[in-house]
Image (cartoon, rainbow, N blue to C red):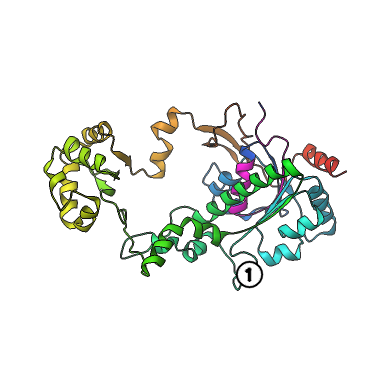
Amino acid sequence: MAAPLDGIIVLAVEQAIAAPFCTRQLVDLGARVLKIERPGSGDFARDYDTTVDGSSAFFVWGNRGKDSLELDLKDTGDRATLESLLAGADVFIQNLAPGAAERAGLLAHQVRDRHQAIVACGISGYGLGGPRTDDKAYDLAIQAEAGAISLTGSEEAPSKVGFSAADIASAMYALSSILAALYRRAQTGEGATIELSMLECLAEWTAAPTYGAVGRDARPVRAGHRHATISPYGIYPLADGSEIVLAVQNRTEWEALACEVFGMPDLVTDERFSTNEARVSNLEAFEPLLRAGLASVPAEEMLGRLRIARIAVGRVNDPLAVWEHEQLRARDRFITTELPTGRAETYRPPFNIDDTPDAHPVVPAVGQHDLGLLDELRRRAD
């Protein structure tokens, strides 16, 4: 069976993470992505590090399965080539700075003006219009602006989210917008203009605590390793010093934890702990009992009790432990990927659509484009 986006051609003037991570998902769904890179050096994310068998971890993550073409967008001949490629593409995406994109005629609405049937998408830090349009924006700055840093960390110290949350948020909104626009185009023949702001995308992800803060007219207090409004729900140690996340969200689970796991039925009737609201209000009294209960038997026995009682529990894994996760390994979630510098194991795409072939597991070198794809795009334009 063909992949869902088989036959879809995507042209990407992209760098770093937001647009590349979007187009990598399109590749995983069967599209052909032609990545336009500056001659010689290419996407600057290629040079972040050399940790994946000589290649950058971020570049490998965001660019598996694409073709690469070197074009100098300031060169007249190369611009003509780009324009001919646009004429044959189904989707165009870019995440240049808004001023640079506008000067190059590559804002989404500019591309649509010239190619009405294309789905054109632009990603910028703050969006077009408004006082911050031209500000430089990287992931960490947007995490700060959108409230993610304020919401993360301990009560005493804020912290960034430990992965590229703003880039990923905007990439996934770009992906869903493009898929929706392609569906509409299949029904009506219409193209689409999509302009996304990283700030707006991540602000949507932080919306629930923002709504709550506005409703209370008070800044939320960071809860650190705990949930702000549910207990027990947080990180706790077992007898061997390893840490787990334990989560109880209803009375049935609370009774199972107290009675079946800890053998302490009196906790259920103790007015200080009988309800979630009471436990949150009495954390100083409750958490020593919780910690003592979790450490009362060997770690593996406690994990077994929690699972039998159907209590949500997860190990606090570092990335090395995640890589060896028994569930990922049992489900064969890895694939060997060819790199410009060697080869490495990477995750399989998580879409899991039945009868869909694996995406092409190759990360391109700069300019390692498929000449057949270029010819196909030119034929489409003609």
- Name the quarter where the N terminus is drawn: top right
Question: Where does the image place residue 243, in percent across and percent down from the top left?
Answer: 28, 45
Residue under label 1, please give it. 134
Res 375 visible? yes
214 in relation to 231, above or below = below
Residue at the image position 81 percent from the left and 48 percent from the top: 87
Amino acid type shown at disc 1: Asp
Q: Residue furthest right?
A: 382
The stretch of residues the image draws in magenta is 2-26
Does the magenta segment cover residue 10?
Answer: yes
Question: Where does the image place residue 95, in percent across and percent down from the top left?
Answer: 65, 57
Residue at the image position 76 percent from the left and 56 percent from the top: 111
The answer to which image quadrant residue 98 occupies is bottom right
Residue nearer the viewer, 262 or 367: 262
Crowding at label 1, few (<14), some or many (≥20) Cα neighbours within 10 Å?
some
345 in relation to 148, above or below = above
> Circle 1 sits in a helix, a strand or a loop, which is it?
loop
Question: Where does the image place residue 348, in percent across and percent down from the top left?
Answer: 54, 35
Residue nearer the viewer, 310 or 316: 310
Does the magenta segment cover residue 373?
Answer: no
Q: Answer left or right for 82 relative to 137.
A: right
249 in relation to 5, above or below = below
Residue at the image position 67 percent from the left and 29 percent from the top: 2
